Amino acid sequence: MQIFTCPFCGPREETEFHFGAEAGKARPEPAPEISDAAWADYLYMNEAPRGRAREIWVHLTCGEFFVMERDTVTREVLTVAALPGREA
Ligand SMILES: [Zn+2]
């Protein structure tokens, strides 16, 4: 069992967390002009880098979203931080 650290609650088992999205992924705009293919690409296509990844996660227990930087190879969590404006 891996332990992740919620910036609001502290260390918890990984089963309390859910992946949200890649951090920094820009929503295509303006929405009425975006093709279905471009929208599907935005929703479902992720970089999935080997190594360092910056992602949005949610702690299901408190409901807070935060940024987690982790190494996808070693599974090491490098940093966790609240989203801007949501600091603990
Ligand atoms: Zn939490």
Image (tube, rainbow, N blue to C red):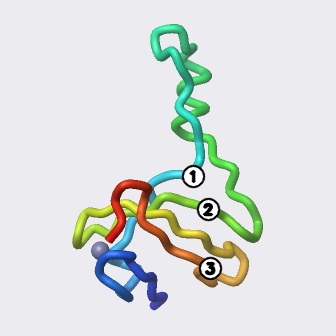
**Residue at (58% x, 80% y) in the render:** 77
Discs 1/3, front: 3
Q: Which mark is residue 78?
A: 3
As drawn, is 18 to the left or to the right of 60? right
Which residue: 47% across, 69% down? Answer: 81
Q: Which is nearer the N-term, disc 2 or disc 3?
A: 2
- SS of the residue at dot 2? strand
Residue 45 in picture, x, y percent from top left: 62, 41
Q: Which sits earlier in the primary sequence, circle 1 or circle 2? A: 1
Question: In the structure shown, which secondary structural element does the residue marked by tag 1 occupy?
Answer: strand
Q: Quadrant of residue 53?
A: bottom right
The residue pinned by badge 2 equals 54
> Circles 1 and 2: CB distance less than 8 Å?
yes
| Marks 2/3: CA–CA distance | 10 Å
Residue 36 at what x, y percent from top left?
54, 18
Q: Quadrant of the N terminus?
A: bottom left
Residue 12, by quadrant, is: bottom left
Marks 2 & 3, CB-CB < 8 Å contact: no
State the residue at coordinates (53%, 69%). Answer: 68
Q: Is mark 2 within 8 Å of ligand 1?
A: no
The Cα–Cα distance between marks 1 and 2, rounded to whole angstroms, is 6 Å
Residue 22's mark?
1
- Three-letter code for the amino acid on which mark 3 is drawn: Leu
